[in-house]
Amino acid sequence: MAKHTWIIALACAALCVALAACSGGGESEKTNPSSETSGSPLNAPATIEAQTFNDGAAISSNGASIDTSQVANGYVAAKGTSSSRLKFQVTKGDMSYNYDLPSDGSPIYCPINMGDGEYSFRVMQNTSGQNYVEIASTQENVSLTSEFSPFLQPNVYCDYNESSECVSVARSLTAQASNQGEAVQAICEYIINNISYDTSKADTLRTATGYIPSPDDTLASGTGICFDYASLGCAMLRSQGIPCQIITGYVSPDDIYHAWIMVYIDGVWKCGEFSVSRNTWSRVDLTFAASSGNVSQVGDGKNYTVRYTY
């Protein structure tokens, strides 16, 4: 296979540095005094299906492998071994997502997040600076089983499984939910009331790259940055069969880079801070709610511009 050198814009690195700058700070009452919920009954999966790398179906080259056997179900997997840094690139049209790929052969699972159509998948190996060479690639014409499939699965930024504590807590919180709106309310209010913003972590990550949130770590520590809030909320909601997206982008004022979630239910949850409507993607900014809207750090909760969806 001919090798072509690519210069990868390190979007993930910029993402992590920018997200680390989103600090909450301050205490909040973290309450929703009046709340309305409605909707269809919650249809949570009985178990979380394990994601596994299918070596038999994978395209392999130069120590790297790409498994596209589950793209219809909303995700693609990659792994590789190398003494140099690796990236996994997912491209459709003029939009690309770049993920850090472990060099020890551990697989990562990434969302098919740009709808149906022709995708290109590449594993890239660092040569020097920000220069990368392609060492494995494949293409797939994707037809998703459902538009929601990518947003009901674990992925590299929303990692959970059957034994995850966040799944256990989500099941407990929603066990008595009478409708989908009530389930969303229970999970989101739990996070708002139990996770505090970690300014020390934000300061530590300010100059770091490659940060990957862990829902269970956030739950255990009771602290996190905006990416952690979004990752935990997404994992808990997806585990209960509620489509959820992690969104990163900009908020007003001053175009602060930030992370939040979007949820989709056959129901509603309306309160003082959130308005989740029926059968549409609705924004829920858990960090903003938990921090009492510290405008200088997490924005003013008004104008949002989407950059990436996971």
Image (cartoon, rainbow, N blue to C red):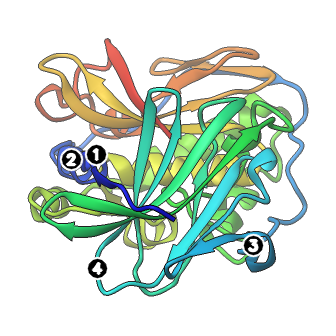
Earlier in the chain: of badge 2 and badge 3, it is 2
**Left-right relation of 70 to 250:** right
| Front residue of this view, candidates 99 and 262 | 99
Q: Could you tell me if residue 136 is visible in this image?
A: yes
Q: CA distance from mark 2 to mark 3?
A: 32 Å
Give the mark, 3 or 4, whose residue is nearer the N terminus. Answer: 4
- For the point 54% across and 48% down, which residue is it? 233
Q: Who comes first in sequence, dot 4 or dot 1?
A: 1
Q: Mark 2 is on which residue type? A: Ala
Q: Is residue 26 visible?
A: no
Q: Residues within 10 Å of mark 2 (few under 14, many from 20)?
A: some
- Marks 4 and 1, Cα distance to the nearest angstrom? 18 Å
Question: Which residue in the protein does label 2 denote?
Answer: 14
Q: Which residue is mark 1?
A: 11
Is label 3 in a helix, a strand or a loop?
Answer: loop
Task: Tell me, yes or no, whether the two marked residues, 3 and 4, touch with CB atoms within 8 Å.
Answer: no
- Label 1 amino acid? Ala
Kindly identify which residue carries mark 4: 84
- Image spot of residue 298 (x, y percent): 23, 33
Q: Earlier in the sequence, mark 2 or mark 4?
A: 2
Q: Is residue 46 left or right of residue 138?
A: right
Asked which secondary structure carries label 2, the reply is: helix
- Residue type at the position of mark 3: Glu
Residue 262 appears at what percent x and percent y?
55, 30
Q: Which residue is mark 3?
A: 162
Closer mark to the observer between disc 1 and disc 3: 1
Give, as a three-letter code, the residue at label 4: Ser
Mark 1–mark 2 contact, CB under 8 Å?
A: yes
